[in-house]
Amino acid sequence: MFKDRIDAGQQLAEALDEYKEQSDTIVLAIPRGGIILGVEIANALNIEFSILISRKLPLPLNPESGFGALAEDGSLYLHPQARLWVSEEQIDETIESQKKVIKERIETLRENKSLPSLEEKTVILVDDGIAMGSTMEAATRMCRLKRVKKIVVAVPVASPRAMHRFYELSDDLIVLESPPDFRAVAEVYQNWWDVSDHEALQAMKKIKPGN
């Protein structure tokens, strides 16, 4: 159980201590919840920080669930059964819709700046938890295309199914909790809320100079 995202980020930073002050290492937080944790990690480890936009592709009739995810460079992950759930037309429409949201997120949260170069870097991908893992999978695909040296997936909590998947997709996996009866990421937090753009921007102001 974590008090909140700040507490979870601080605990993750302890588990990531081997990456402290590594000049070729960068924390990439997935907005918006992941930003709160990512700031804590980057400050504790004294390493570079940025954000990587990866968006769930929501099901038309059940937007809380998704059929895949899209990263900001166009890297796409579709659930193996996606085409049984939605038509090709719906897939295309949802992708186009999320491209617009991604553009808005880059403008708002990264001030329209490009990502730092990731080539030959160790990338620590951070989110506040992994349930199905679609957004994290799209993020890992993007990082592979950027020719990173190493991908570290670091989250406070993940479903057992997601853990199995990311053992394969990452070079290092840090998960603090994986309840066998996992139902939702929010269940391991005492205080959980949807992080706003304002909160995310305020959190990023706490990044230490040089990070």
Image (tube, rainbow, N blue to C red):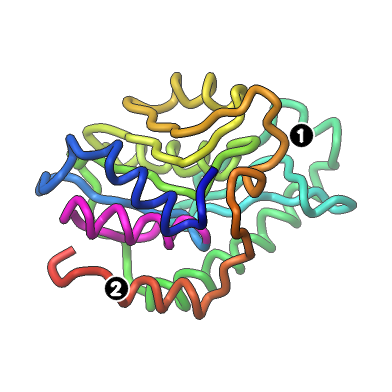
Query: Sequence-wise, which precedes: disc 2 or disc 1?
Result: 1
Give me the disc on residue 82.
Answer: 1
User: Image quarter for residue 63?
Assistant: bottom right
Q: Amino acid at mark 1?
A: Ala
Q: Nearer the viewer, residue 196 or 67?
A: 196
Query: In the rendered image, which residue does mark 2 sit on?
Result: 206
Crowding at mark 1 (Cα within 10 Å: few <14, some 14-19, many 20+): some
> Could you say where residue 171 lies in the image, as x and y percent from the top left?
32, 25
Q: Amino acid at mark 2?
A: Lys
Residue 41 spot, x, y in % from top left = 30, 52
Q: Secondary structure at mark 1?
A: helix
Q: Is residue 10 above or below residue 142?
A: below
* Residue visible at 15% across and 72% down in the picture: 209
Which image quadrant is residue 169 in?
top left
Q: CA distance from mark 2 to mark 1?
A: 40 Å
Looking at the figure, which quarter contains the C terminus?
bottom left
Query: Image check: 77 left or right of 11?
Result: right
- 95 lies above or below 168: below
Magenta stretch, residue numbers: 33-51
